[in-house]
């Protein structure tokens, strides 16, 4: 390769990359593991000095990443304005340098940002929380603080008696989840939206847009500042290891929970799906029907959702109660669920330009609220 070397950096909110070598417009890179953890999959970096030149970026050693099956069929996301995120042509060779994703892109301008999925910065989080907190009938409380001293924000609204908890980004690299939150909150705070008005009349909402601010700012995939996977702490959270979960679960104990949705992203499955609580000890048909009925409503309401692909259900009595959905369903007798969105495209409704996108996440947030109102109508 010829010409001046490009520059690559990631020392910013949510940044993550290791630069192994640079040669002209090409570079060999690796992903930094989460602090005090072996999890690695999230990347987010900036390339400068490449206007009009084809970049060839090789991210190596990916067979040791958290989810190697996430790379075949995956396309890196790229933006030149940090607002619109498109796909960059990507190919995966599991036998090259321990597994290599090769990304090719020709920027029109001198700067281009690359990421595993469209990033959702802590600054954007604070903008979202501030805008919602200034909306009529919305309050914001801090449930606690993280190990790095960041607030765990909870937005509350609604006058009804149904206690609804919506929470996202236990796994910080699953930025789809906070884009979903943006869409859901836009709908709920719109005074002209009839679905929002009906929901707020019937429910009290408790919404935590980001459960893991430390991991988000540090550029982690899956863990907090101590390298702890928060979604395996719900049976026994501690102030030392998982203050985020401890604060959230304590707040739920105060209010009770009727309906809960934990919002995530999945690396390997190219679809939107829900996971429930099939394996709960002593699970009754009536309790589980709350989940299956919501899933059927969402399936009917949006083509972006489907029920054929997803996780293998736990066997009866074999639920992992350290996970939030099963713990919340068990602890409160609630209808609880985990919503998963893809990093890849949504194969049922593909979009070659963007694959699964922030815009689709936001729309799904709105759709899930519409499904919730219909679910409440049939709850008796």
Image (tube, rainbow, N blue to C red):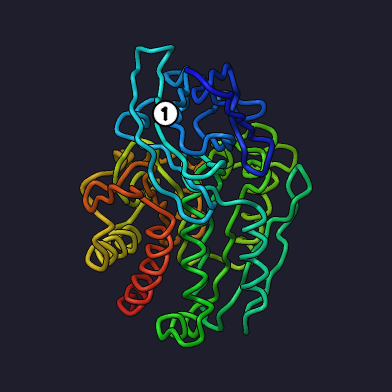
Question: As drawn, is 348 to the left or to the right of 88?
Answer: left
- Give me the residue at 45% from left, 22% from top: 58
Which type of secondary structure does the marked residue at label 1 adopt? loop
At label 1, counting other C-alpha atoms closer than 10 Å, the crowd grade (few under 14, some 14-19, many 20 or more) is: some
Position of the C terminus by quadrant? bottom left
Q: Which of 326/172 is in front? A: 172
Residue placed furthest toward the right:
149
- The residue wearing badge 1 is 67
The residue at the point 31 percent across, 64 percent down is: 294
In the image, residue 334 sits, relative to residue 233, either above or below, namely below
Numbered label tally: 1
Q: Residue furthest front?
A: 3
Q: Nearer the viewer, residue 88 or 97?
A: 88
Give percent across and percent down for residue 29: 53, 22
Q: On the rendered structure, is 91 left or right of 38?
A: left
Q: Nearer the viewer, residue 5 or 156?
A: 5
Left or right? Give the position of 359 relative to 81. Answer: left
Q: Position of residue 164 (x, y in %)?
A: 50, 68
Residue 142: give x, y in percent of width and height: 72, 62
Q: Is residue 40 left or right of residue 72?
A: right
- Which residue is more in the foreground, 177 or 22? 22
Residue 357 position, x and y percent, is 39, 53
Quadrant in the picture for residue 68 = top left
Q: Residue at x 47, y 66 (%)?
A: 183
Q: Residue at x 49, y 57 (%)?
A: 179
Q: Quadrant of residue 259?
A: bottom left
């Amino acid at each position: 390769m010829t010409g001046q070397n490009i520059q690559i950096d990631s020392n910013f909110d949510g940044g993550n990359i290791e630069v192994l070598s640079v040669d002209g417009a090409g570079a060999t890179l690796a992903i930094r593991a989460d602090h005090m953890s072996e999890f690695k999959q999230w990347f987010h970096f900036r390339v400068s000095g490449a206007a009009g030149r084809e970049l060839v970026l090789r991210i190596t050693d990916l067979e040791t990443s958290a989810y190697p099956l996430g790379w075949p069929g995956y396309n890196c996301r790229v933006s030149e304005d940090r607002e619109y995120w498109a796909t960059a042509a990507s190919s995966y060779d599991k036998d090259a340098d321990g597994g290599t994703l090769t990304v090719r892109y020709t920027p029109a301008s001198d700067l281009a940002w690359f990421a595993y999925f469209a990033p959702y910065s802590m600054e954007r989080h604070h903008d979202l929380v501030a805008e919602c907190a200034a909306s009529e009938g919305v309050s914001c409380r801090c449930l606690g603080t993280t190990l790095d001293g960041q607030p765990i924000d909870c937005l509350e609204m609604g006058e009804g008696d149904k206690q609804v908890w919506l929470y996202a980004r236990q796994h910080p690299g699953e930025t789809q989840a906070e884009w979903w939150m943006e869409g859901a909150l836009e709908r709920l705070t719109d005074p002209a939206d009839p679905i929002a008005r009906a929901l707020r009349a019937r429910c009290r909402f408790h919404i935590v847009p980001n459960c893991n601010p430390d991991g988000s700012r540090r550029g982690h995939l899956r863990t907090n500042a101590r390298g702890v996977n928060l979604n395996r702490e719900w049976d026994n959270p501690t102030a030392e290891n998982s203050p985020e979960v401890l604060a959230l679960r304590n707040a739920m104990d105060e209010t009770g929970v009727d309906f809960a949705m934990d919002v995530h992203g999945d690396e390997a499955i190219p679809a939107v799906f829900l996971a429930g609580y099939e394996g709960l000890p002593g699970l009754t048909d009536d309790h589980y029907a709350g989940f299956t009925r919501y899933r059927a409503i969402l399936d009917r309401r949006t083509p972006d959702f489907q029920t054929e692909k997803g996780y293998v259900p736990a066997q009866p009595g074999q639920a992992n109660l350290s996970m939030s959905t099963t713990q919340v369903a068990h602890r409160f007798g609630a209808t609880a669920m985990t919503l998963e969105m893809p990093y890849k495209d949504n194969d049922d409704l593909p979009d070659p330009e963007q694959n699964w996108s922030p815009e689709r996440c936001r729309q799904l947030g709105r759709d899930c609220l519409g499904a919730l109102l219909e679910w409440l109508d049939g709850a008796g």
